[in-house]
Image (spheres, rainbow, N blue to C red):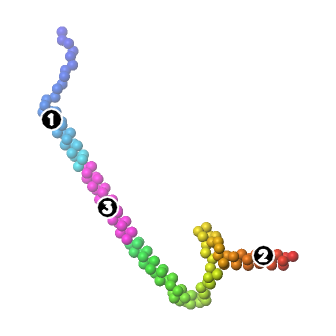
Amino acid sequence: MRRNRKRSKKMSVMASRSMHIGAVLVMFFVMVILNLLASSSCTQIMKSIGEKERTLAKLEDERMRESARWDAMKTADNIDRALLKFGLSMRYAKAEQIVRMDAAGRPKPGQLAVARARRSSSALRTASTAKKR
């Protein structure tokens, strides 16, 4: 009687080598495909960066032109010309009429114009309450 023995299936040396070579070829082709995908992705990103850099340069040039134009418009002669053009007679404020404001929109303390405005407004309030009586 024969025993049921498991057969050991050994591959031939040639078959195992061909499997190794096949695995190496498959890995090589996968690497080539991944390299091509990465290359095309990098090319697209480089084109996008180039477009954005050109747009940035164009906007920077436009900003510089507008800044120079605005600086030219702010000169005293050009302001006077514009006022005359629209028929406005204005003068520059005197130093005691200028009120400097902080970032929150409140007058900075210690200014002469603020103290005068407070005194005059309190005098007006006193005069208006005296009329009511």
Dominant secondary structure of the residues highlighted in magenta in the image:
helix
Q: Earlier in the sequence, mark 1 or mark 2?
A: 1
Q: Residue at x 17, y 26 (%)?
A: 10
Q: Residue at x 70, y 78 (%)?
A: 116
Residue 65, percent across and down?
42, 78
Does residue 90 sit above or below 112 in this rendering?
below
Q: Residue furthest left?
A: 14
Does residue 21 sit above or below 59 in this rendering?
above
Secondary structure category for the residue under label 2: helix
Quarter of the picture holding the C terminus:
bottom right
Q: Amino acid at mark 2?
A: Arg
* Cα–Cα gap, marks 1 and 2: 106 Å
For mark 3, does the 10 Å Cα neighbourhood hold few (<14), some (14 to 19), or many (20 or more) residues?
few
The range drawn in magenta is 33-57
The nearer-to-camera label among 3 and 2 is 2
Q: Residue at x 56, y 90 (%)?
A: 84
Secondary structure category for the residue under label 1: helix
Q: Amino acid at mark 3?
A: Met
Residue 102, percent across and down?
60, 70
Q: Name the residue beneath numbered marker 3.
A: 46
Q: Amino acid at mark 1?
A: Arg
- Find residue 108 and name its label: none
Residue 2, percent across and down?
18, 11
* Cα–Cα gap, marks 3 and 2: 70 Å
Q: Name the residue beneath numbered marker 1.
A: 17
Q: Name the residue beneath numbered marker 2.
A: 125
Residue 10 placement, left or right of 107: left
Q: Earlier in the sequence, mark 3 or mark 2?
A: 3
Q: Residue 112's quadrant in the figure?
A: bottom right
Quarter of the picture holding the N terminus:
top left
Tell which of 31 and 67 is nearer to you. 67
* Cα–Cα gap, marks 3 and 1: 43 Å
